[in-house]
Amino acid sequence: MFQLSKLIKSLEDEFIKNDITESITLRRSSIPSFDLQIDNLVKFQKHKNIKAIVNSFSKLIENEPLIKNFEVAKNGFINIEINLENYVFEIENIMNALKKTKKSKKIILDYGGPNIGKPLHVGHLRSLNIGRSLYQINKLAGNNVLNDIHLGDWGMPVAQIICYMEINNIDIEKIEIHDLESIYPKASKQYLEDNIFNLQAQELNKKLNENQKDVIKKWQKLRSISVESIKETLRILNHSFDLWMGESDVNNLIPLMLDDLKKDKKISIDKGAYVSNFESDPKVLITKSDGSYLYLTTDLATVLNRKDKNKIDKTLYIVDKRQKLHFEQLFNSIQYFQFDNGEYTHVEFGTVNDSNGNPFRTRDGDSKKLNELFEDTLSKIKSINEKLDEETSKLLANTVLTFSDLITNRKTDYKFDLDKFTRISGKTGIYVQYAHVRAKKLIQNSNINIDKVDLATSEMDDTDITLLRAFLKFEYTFSQALKNNEPHHLADYLYELSSVFNSMYQNVNILENKNTKLKLNKLKITKHFVNYSKLLMQSLGIQPIEKM
Ligand code: ARG
């Protein structure tokens, strides 16, 4: 916590004097009468100087003006109550300080990852939501961030579509996105069931890899129809990408990459296929026996390409947890092949199921399309509140799709339950938007310039204090989300703040209150709430609404 950084430094220095190298962490306390806790002393209970250390710690804490009260428990836990009077609640100050604590990193976020020929569907929802939130969180933390949609736009699936169209005399110049969407499942089915088609598609894939002019022309058309439709859905869902790279962008880098790996004796031939010489079970396959490339081959080439073009410190892949083995193999290979020594992380997530817990499908058995999911959510919102204008309803639909997704720990699966997610009470996106709008309205209606108001802590009631103390948890919560790539900490916290704000709001009539000091305090605290809630929404990828 930046306002306590001097104290933290002195505590760490005290540790050093006793030959302990340890960074002090302030966590949020779960004890109601305390705000923060330090548990660094717990594991040093057997240290020969523990008594002296506890003493020096106590003195240092006692002399800290920001701390009102504290206790050191027997097992070494230190519980701290903050002096609200001396605390700076301005979120801009907190964010600025937060940015300065770490060196800015160049980070690439690989998420979305749709394959061309198929529409965006419910399987893409979490990658998009988590990806966008981590993008925002990292930006707010002062990092230099890029997001790349990493299209699946090359290889067998694409060859199957083109081959299918050739055989059935479908003129690619004339097709539209809905034709394409119906071709894809037919082509992949036939590829599995029909040997002749299978061979033809492989033949076409070869031509694609040889960059034959007529095939490339068809591929370009196919790609552009698909990308246009993907962009349209992303626009509705309020997503955007800095980079629109894909598997096709690195295909021509692969032969050279393989040559180098052969030269360096990092891969060898096994029954016609290339496998990595890295000891592992199963062995890591780099190419297939017919020489064709795998998902892994492309991801390895992408690593080289990004390193070359973007000079990256850290790469996050926001991809379904079912691809765990793939990313383990990728990261091991990056190390073993000495491609890069940057940080690579698989930010894995669970599945979105329907409200009964089954795979989320349409009546025809296809995965639910994201634009349809959006439409369903929008209609639901309109049916609940008919008076809302179109713009607000759309923002709320996106809020629901985002908030209900991010509030779940990303590693667990969840059921998509539209009734539950659109409720006005409970942990919903609607609830947090409602609290936010209510707070903004209160300030507007007061006609007071709140920026000029100072908090008078002597005039506060319990609900004011509870809300102020809830603000204290911001820094820790934000850094947890950042460190663990887990937006749910922030979603949970936004709900907590909103509900504490609602209690404060409902406690007394604020605008009509005769006690001016109390009223001004409440308005000032409300203003802080608006700022915290806005920043939390921003970090979740949610746009605050103006009216409701
Ligand atoms: N297109 C892939 C799929 O549908 C996801 C891509 C994820 N990103 C990556 N670099 N592998 O499974």
Image: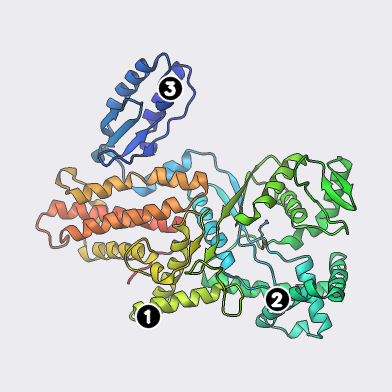
Report the residue marked by disc 3: 44
Please name the amino acid that badge 2 sits on: Pro
Q: Are marks 3 and 2 in contact (CB under 8 Å)?
A: no
At a point 44% along the width and 76% down the height, the residue shown is 378
- Where residue 282 is drawn, which disc sits there? none
* Up/down of 445 relative to 271, above or below: below
Please name the amino acid that badge 3 sits on: Phe
**Label 3 crowd (10 A; few <14 / some 14-19 / many >=20):** some
Say how many tags the image has: 3
Nearer the observer, 374 or 280: 280
Residue 471, x across and y down, in percent:
32, 47
Residue 175, x across and y down, in percent:
72, 84
Q: Are marks 3 and 1 in contact (CB under 8 Å)?
A: no
**Label 2 crowd (10 A; few <14 / some 14-19 / many >=20):** some
For marks 3 and 1 on the same chain, the one whose residue lies earlier in the sequence: 3
Report the residue marked by disc 1: 383
For marks 1 and 2 on the same chain, the one whose residue lies earlier in the sequence: 2
In three-dimensional space, the C-alpha distance between marks 1 and 2, rounded to whole angstroms, equals 34 Å
- Local SS, label 2: helix
- Tell whether 303 sits left or right of 33: right
- The answer, for residue 99, to whether it is visible in the render is yes
Farthest left residue in view: 514
For marks 3 and 2 on the same chain, the one whose residue lies earlier in the sequence: 3
Farthest top residue in view: 48
In three-dimensional space, the C-alpha distance between marks 3 and 1, rounded to whole angstroms, equals 59 Å
Report the residue marked by disc 2: 185
In three-dimensional space, the C-alpha distance between marks 3 and 2, rounded to whole angstroms, equals 61 Å
- Tell whether 305 sits left or right of 261: left
Disc 1 vs disc 2: which is toward the camera? Answer: 2
* Up/down of 125 relative to 226, above or below: above
- Local SS, label 3: helix
At a point 9% along the width and 58% down the height, the residue shown is 514
